[in-house]
Image: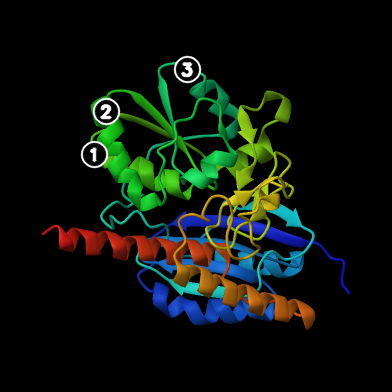
Amino acid sequence: MSTEKSLVVAYYKFVDLPDFEARKQPLLEFCEQHGVKGTILLAHEGINSTMAGPEAGVEAVLEYLQSDPAIGALTVKRSWADECPFYRMKVRLKKEIVRLGLPEVNPNDQVGEYVPPEKWNELISDPDVILVDTRNDYEYEIGTFKGALDPNTKSFREFPDYVKKELADKKDKKVAMFCTGGIRCEKSTSYLLKEGFEKVYHLEGGILNYLEKVDPKESLWQGDCFVFDNRVAVDHSLKKGDYEMCRACRHALTEEETKSEKYVEGISCPHCFDTLTEEQRIRAAERQKQVEISKALGRKHIGATLLEREQWREQKLEERKKANEKKGE
């Protein structure tokens, strides 16, 4: 059995790709040929991905992408895992590479001021700066920057509502935002500028870039950073954190929470036990049964990646929102 570690890379780029649909199959085949797994999202507005595999294979895919004149150089965040945190390779076509639900907001048109990790502490230590975490509530809960506001969103598509309710009267203030890899705060700064905010900043390369570049002794980061793969979270050294994952609600769980009577592996946890419908419990139980059968047979269960489940969840939230709006007509 191979003991080779898996190189995990995260990258994105807002760039005009009018032929994005035609890129899907060649890119998928190239990744599979080099043993690379994960998810790559392609849209007219650009590319977004987290993928992993043998170092040579991952670097070959990155070279393949960056040699394309339409894409060019990518800013890549690298980390290592004891084994590949993905089960398969997916290349998906999307309307947006990160779903804000407002296609007219395009960072290719305008974006806030990038702040490198080395200057981030100075910016967010300014008492006049409003620091906003653009991630979801379950991400904020296990780690964030000191003094950061939690929009308490379940999905990035809820972020515009938060801005309208909580920040609309602060358009003359300095607003600094951050997210895991930089993609959500790029789009959120573009949105704020479109809404008339005057001084908007965001952490270049996101939290992962900050954790890589800033000495822990000088860090203003508190806790772990949630990641959308089977590592669940990484610490300040970008090593796997001490969390498990609830496969029902995707919440990161501490060791103590996994000992709760409400925790049933693959089915429920203390965060979702009281909200799951009987249909959801049955569906989760069936999936867990398939996982256990696969383990007994000595093979990995090929289920959806965390990123894919996040996309599915956002789609269901959108469908529910539209249904509620229709009822209110």
Q: Earlier in the sequence, mark 2 or mark 1?
A: 2
**Are circles 3 and 1 on residues that touch, CB within 8 Å?**
no
Outermost left residue: 329
**Of residues 235 and 290, the one drawn nearer to the viewer in this rendering:** 290
Q: Which residue is mark 2?
A: 171
Q: Earlier in the sequence, mark 3 or mark 1?
A: 3
Disc 3 marks a residue whose amino acid type is Asp
**Residue nearer the viewer, 70 or 127:** 127
Quote the CA–CA distance across marks 3 and 2: 17 Å
| Secondary element at tag 3 | loop
Q: Residues under labels 2 and 1: Cα distance?
A: 8 Å
Q: Residues within 10 Å of mark 2 (few under 14, many from 20)?
A: some
Residue 126's disc number = 3
The residue furthest top is 127
Q: Is residue 55 left or right of residue 195?
A: right
- The local secondary structure at tag 1 comes to loop
Q: Is residue 96 visible?
A: no
